[in-house]
Image: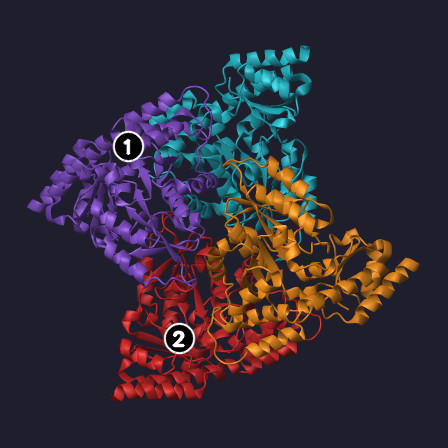
Chain colours: A orange, B red, C cyan, D purple
Amino acid sequence: MRFFSDNTGGACPEIIDAIATANRGLEKAYGDDPWTRRLDEVLSGFFARPVRAFAVATGTAANSLSLATLSPPYGAIFAHEEAHIVCDECGAPGFFSGGAQLTVLPGAHAKVTAERLQAVLDAHPVSVHAVQPAAVSLTQATEYGTTYRPAEIAAISEVAHARGVKVHMDGARFANSVAFLDCHPADVTWRAGVDVLSFGATKNGALGAEAVVFFDPTAVKDFELRRKRAGHLLSKSRYVSAQLLAYVETGVWRRNALRTNALAQQIARAAGTSLLYPVEANEVFLRLGAERKRTLRTAGFEFYDWGPASSGEARLVVSWDQPESDVTALCEALQHFSDS
Amino acid sequence: MRFFSDNTGGACPEIIDAIATANRGLEKAYGDDPWTRRLDEVLSGFFARPVRAFAVATGTAANSLSLATLSPPYGAIFAHEEAHIVCDECGAPGFFSGGAQLTVLPGAHAKVTAERLQAVLDAHPVSVHAVQPAAVSLTQATEYGTTYRPAEIAAISEVAHARGVKVHMDGARFANSVAFLDCHPADVTWRAGVDVLSFGATKNGALGAEAVVFFDPTAVKDFELRRKRAGHLLSKSRYVSAQLLAYVETGVWRRNALRTNALAQQIARAAGTSLLYPVEANEVFLRLGAERKRTLRTAGFEFYDWGPASSGEARLVVSWDQPESDVTALCEALQHFSDS
Amino acid sequence: MRFFSDNTGGACPEIIDAIATANRGLEKAYGDDPWTRRLDEVLSGFFARPVRAFAVATGTAANSLSLATLSPPYGAIFAHEEAHIVCDECGAPGFFSGGAQLTVLPGAHAKVTAERLQAVLDAHPVSVHAVQPAAVSLTQATEYGTTYRPAEIAAISEVAHARGVKVHMDGARFANSVAFLDCHPADVTWRAGVDVLSFGATKNGALGAEAVVFFDPTAVKDFELRRKRAGHLLSKSRYVSAQLLAYVETGVWRRNALRTNALAQQIARAAGTSLLYPVEANEVFLRLGAERKRTLRTAGFEFYDWGPASSGEARLVVSWDQPESDVTALCEALQHFSDS
Amino acid sequence: MRFFSDNTGGACPEIIDAIATANRGLEKAYGDDPWTRRLDEVLSGFFARPVRAFAVATGTAANSLSLATLSPPYGAIFAHEEAHIVCDECGAPGFFSGGAQLTVLPGAHAKVTAERLQAVLDAHPVSVHAVQPAAVSLTQATEYGTTYRPAEIAAISEVAHARGVKVHMDGARFANSVAFLDCHPADVTWRAGVDVLSFGATKNGALGAEAVVFFDPTAVKDFELRRKRAGHLLSKSRYVSAQLLAYVETGVWRRNALRTNALAQQIARAAGTSLLYPVEANEVFLRLGAERKRTLRTAGFEFYDWGPASSGEARLVVSWDQPESDVTALCEALQHFSDS
C-alpha cells in the first residue's frame, strides 16, 4: 500500500488512449504536428484567455525553463524555503538561469505571504552589489498540501509587480488546488496576477507531461530557444502534447484531483489530532512518532518520513490510481491509534 | 509520403506494448522501479561488458549531459563541423557544460579523421590561454548517413586518449550503423575506445527514449546529479526504461534498422548518379536540382532541402514505419529522372 | 571625515613604492615575471607551510574563483546569511560555479557555528534531488567586525571535512583579525582546517590586490584555467604581485591593521552603550537612532546606514589612512551623546 | 631584447603620475569617485559622441562582458578564426554569456569580411535548432597586426545590423590602428556601425586599464550588473579610471602608438621578403625558418614562434618602452639575413 508520492501512480486510461491515438503514421517532428498545434487553443480555452503553452516532460524542466525566462543571471528568485525548486531539483533554477540566486522565505503552511515578500523587497538594495529581484515562485498546491486562495496570490502578485518582479506558479499539483477551491483555473492564475504557470499533469495521471503556460507572451521566443537548448523539445512532440490535450479535454484533470482530494480528506479525518496541516489537496502530513510509524510500516503501509526520521513525522500522498482499499485500511489503522 | 526525418515515425508496437505493460499500479518514482533497475544489466548484456546506463527522453539531453560530464567548463570539445551537437542543438553543449568551446573539424562524409584530430591536438597549446582538449564527439551514423568503421573509431580514440581526451559517440542512429556493419555493438563502442555513448532509440521506433551508456563508470555520480538538475530525470521513469528494455530485448532495434537501411539502399540504387554520399544507414542525400525537387514535391514527396534551397540538394530519411509503397513510388520517380 | 568603508582608503606608500620599483623595462606577461614567481615562496613563508598563491585584483574574484574550484555546479555552498558572498557580490558564486546554490545560516555576530553547520548537514539529504554539500565559506573578520577564534574555525572545519565539505575563508579583512588575535596567520587558516583563503590586501592599504591561497594544492590547475577564463589573469601581473609581496614583506599588513583596529577600539569606547557588537577588527556598529545620525552627518561625519535607514543603526569603518583627527572628533561627538 | 608582446612593457610616466595623483585621501569606492565620474564625459569627447564608458582591468573582461551583454546564452558570436576571443581567452565568451557559441570565419590578414559574414548569415537557419546570430566581434588591430579600414567595418556592420546582429570591436590595440589610419577614433567605431568597443590601454602604456565603451546605451544596466557579478568592478576604481583619463587626455595613447608603429615599420623594411603581412600596427610577422630564428635568439632577441615551432614563423611586437637600440639591432640582424 504505497503512499510515497503521486509520482508512483501510473498513467490513466485517457492518457494511454491519447498516446495510442496519436501513434498513427508519419507526423512532422519537433512540435509541428496536429496535437502540438492545438495546445495553445485548448489551453486558451481552459484558462479563458489567450495563452501560449509549451509541453515538456518534467516538472523540473517546466519550473526552471520558466524561471530562466523570467530572471536574468543576476536575478533574485524568491520562494518558500521548502519549495520544490529550492529543495528538490538539485539547483535546477541556478543551472537554467546561469546562476540566479534563490532567496528563501519562511511562511506557515509552506506559503509565501505578501507581507513577507513586501518586507524582503523593501530591504533589498537597488544596486549592482546585490542580485536584483526578478521573480517569485509560488507552489500550488504547496509542499505541505495546502492551497493558496485567489486573494493570497493576488496580494503577492501586487507586491511583486509593483517592484517589477514576475510571478511564477509551480503547479505540479495545480489540479488538486483548483478542485479543492472549486474555482476556475483562471482564478488562481492570471486573474490573480500569475505570469507563467508550470501546469503539471504527470502527478495527476499523465505518463510524463507538463505545460508551461505564458499568460504574457512577450518572453516566448526566449523560452523556445532555451527549451531546445536544454534538450526539452521532444522530437516526437505529438505524444506529450496528446497527453496534455487529453488531460484537459476529457476532464480527467478534475476527476482525478477530486478523487485524490476526497481520499486525502478521509485520511485526514481518521488521523484526528495527529494531522499537521490542513488537507487542501492530496497530501496528508501526520505527527505519528517512531512507534506508530513502525506499526504502520509493519502493516504494509509505505510512505516517506517527513524531515529527519527522528521527527516522527510522515507524509502520505494519494495517487490517482490508489486502490480505495489502501485508504480504507489506512484509515482503520489511524483510527485504531486514536482509540488506543 | 514523408521523408523528412525518422523523427516523423511513430512508436513501434513492441514499444507501445512495453509502456502498456509497465502501466500497472503504483511503482517507486525517479528510477527506483523494476524496469530502471534492470537497465544496467540488460545493456551490459547488449554491449558484452559491465556498463552503467541512464535513460533520458531526448538525444540532445543524452549528448549534452554526456559531454558536460566529460568536459570541464574550460574544455574544448571536438566534433565534425556538421555534427548535430554543433548545428542542431541550439548550443546545448555550451549550456550544459558551463561554456565549453566547440572546436569544429572538416572531414569528408561528415567524418572526423584521426589524422585531422591529431593535427589539431598537436597545434593546440597547453596553456591557460586556451580551452583545453577534453572530448571528441563522433556521430554514428554520421550526419550524411555514413558509418564509421571500427578501425576508424579506434584510430581516433587512440589519438584522443593519448592526449587525455575522452571519446563520446552520438548514436542517435547507432542501430543503423551496427546493422549496416553487421557487427557487434561492442565493436564500434568500447572495443574501439568509446567512453560514453548516447544510444538512441527514438529515431528507430521508440516513443521518446535514449540511453546514456558509460563504459567507464567513474563519472557516473556526476552524471546523475547533472541529469536531475537539468530536469532530465523522469519522475515516472518506468516508462522510458521500459522502452529501452523492449528496444534491446525484443531485437526491434535491429529489425527496424535493417528495414530502413534496406529501403534507403533501394532509394540509393534508384537515384544513380544523383547520390551524394554512400548510403550506410537510413538516410539518402541527393543532388537533384531545383526542378526535380519541385517535381518530386508536386508528386507528393516531402523532404528537406539540404543546405540552402538554392543548392539543389535534398535529404531523404526512411522511418521505421515508412510504408513500402512510399519507397517504391520514390524509386520510380527517381528512375524516371535517370531515364529522362 | 569618511567612515564609509576601508575601500575609501588610498594605497599606502609601501605599495606605491613596490609598483614603482616593478615599473622597470620589459618583463614577461601573464605571471611569468620575477615578482609573480616569488609569490608562492613568500606566502609559504608567511603561512609557515608550502602554499600555492595566485594574485587577482578584487575580492569578489578571489572568493568566487575559490568557490568555483571547490564546488561543482550542483554543490551547496554554506555561508552566514549576511556574508559578503551572499549579499554584496551580485550572485558571483552562482555565476562562477555554474549555478551552485548558496545555503545561508543564521548566527550571532555574523558567525557560522559548528553546531548549526552540523545540524544543517545532518538534515541535508544525500540524493540527486538536492544540491550536495561542497563548501562552507567563513568571513574573517566577519561582516559585523567580529573575529572567529582558532577553535571556532577548527570546530567548523571538523564538521565540514567529516562530510567531505571544503572550507573557504573570505579574508577581505584577514589582517585585522590576525592583528586582533595577535596570532600566527597559520592559526586561523590551515592549522584550523581552512582549505583555501581569499587573502585580502586592498582594504588594508593595497591599490588592488588579493591573493588566493591554496593550502591544499590539488585544485590548482583547475583554478588557473578558471582565472584566465574569467578575465582575472592580469597581463602585466607584476604590478599586482609586487603589491602582495610588499604587503607581506614590509609588514605593512600588520602595521595598518594594528592602527585601524586601535582606532576602532577608541571609537568603541567612546560609543559606550550604543555599541552593537564587540569590536574585533576595524569596523564599529552603533545603534544611534535617526536624530544622532543626523547630528553626526551635519557635523561632517560620513558613514553608511546599517540595514534600513529607519533602523537607526550605523556602520563606521576605519581606513588605514584615516586621519587620527577624524577619529578624535568622532569620539568626542559620541561621548557628547553619552553625556547628554 | 624582448619582442614577446606589448604586454611586456611597463606603465608609462603619464599613467604612473595619474595613479600617484589619484592617491590622495579617502574617496568613495566602487566608482563613485571624481575620476570615474569623469569617464563618460572624457570618452564622449574622445569619440565625439555621447557614450557610456566603464573601466575594467583586463582585455578578456572587456571583451567577454561586452559580448555577454550583446548575446543571449543561445546566441552565435561570429569572429575570425584566429581572434583573441577564440584562441587566447580560455573560452571566456562562453563563460560570461552562459554558453553562447563562437562561430569562426576564415579571412585573409586575420580579417572578417562582409562577404563572408553575409554568406554565413544567409546560410544560418532561423529556428530553435541552432544558436541565433547575436554579435560579430572584430579585432582592431587584428591578430596579424593589420588594420580594418573604416569602409571595411562599415560594410560588416551593415550586414550585421540588417540581421539584428550587434557589432563588437576588440580594440586591445585600437590606438595603433587609429594612429596608422591617421583618422578620428569615431571613424572606425560608431561612424562605421560599431555598437560596443573594448578600448584597450594596457598594451599601449597603461598599468592595467581597459574601457568598455557603449555607443548605444540601452544595454548598460545589464552590463553593470554583469561586471560586478564577475568581480570586475574594482573597489578602488579611482586608480583604473585615472589611468584611462590620463591615457586619453595626455595624448599618450597616440604618442605611444605612433612610436611603436614607426618602429614596427622599421623592422618591416629591414625584413624585406620575409615579411608575412602588411604592418599596420606594432606587430611584425616574419617567415624566418628555424635556423634564422635560432640565430636571432642566440643574439639575444626574444620573441614567440608563430604557429608551431616547425613553421619557421615568428611574431615580434614592439612595446611602448622598447629601447630604440633593440629595434636598431634587430633591423641590422634582419638585413644581414637579406644580404646573405
Q: Is residue C87 above or below residue B59?
A: above
Residue B133 location (% of width, % of height) = 39, 56
For residue D319, side relative to residue B262 (left or right): left
Residue B186 location (% of width, % of height) = 47, 75
For residue D247, side relative to residue A131 (left or right): left
Disc 1 with disc 2 on a shared chain: no
Q: Nearer the viewer, residue A263 or C247?
A: A263
Determine crowd level at label 2: few under 14, some 14-19, many 20+ residues with C-alpha closer than 10 A: some
For residue B88, side relative to residue C171 (left or right): left
Q: Nearer the viewer, residue A225 or D286?
A: A225
Q: Chain of mark 2?
A: B
Give me the disc on residue C309. Answer: none
Give the secondary structure at mark 1: helix
Q: Nearer the viewer, residue A77 or D30?
A: A77
Q: Which residue is mark 2?
A: B150
Q: Chain of mark 1?
A: D
Give the secondary structure at mark 2: helix
Asked whether residue D80 is in view, the answer is: no
Residue D55 location (% of width, % of height) = 38, 34
Image quadrant where residue D238 sits: top left
Q: Which residue is mark 1?
A: D46
Indicate the amino acid at tag 2. Pro
Residue D26 location (% of width, % of height) = 46, 21
Nearer to us: label 1 or label 2: 1
Q: Quadrant of the C terminus of chain A?
A: bottom right
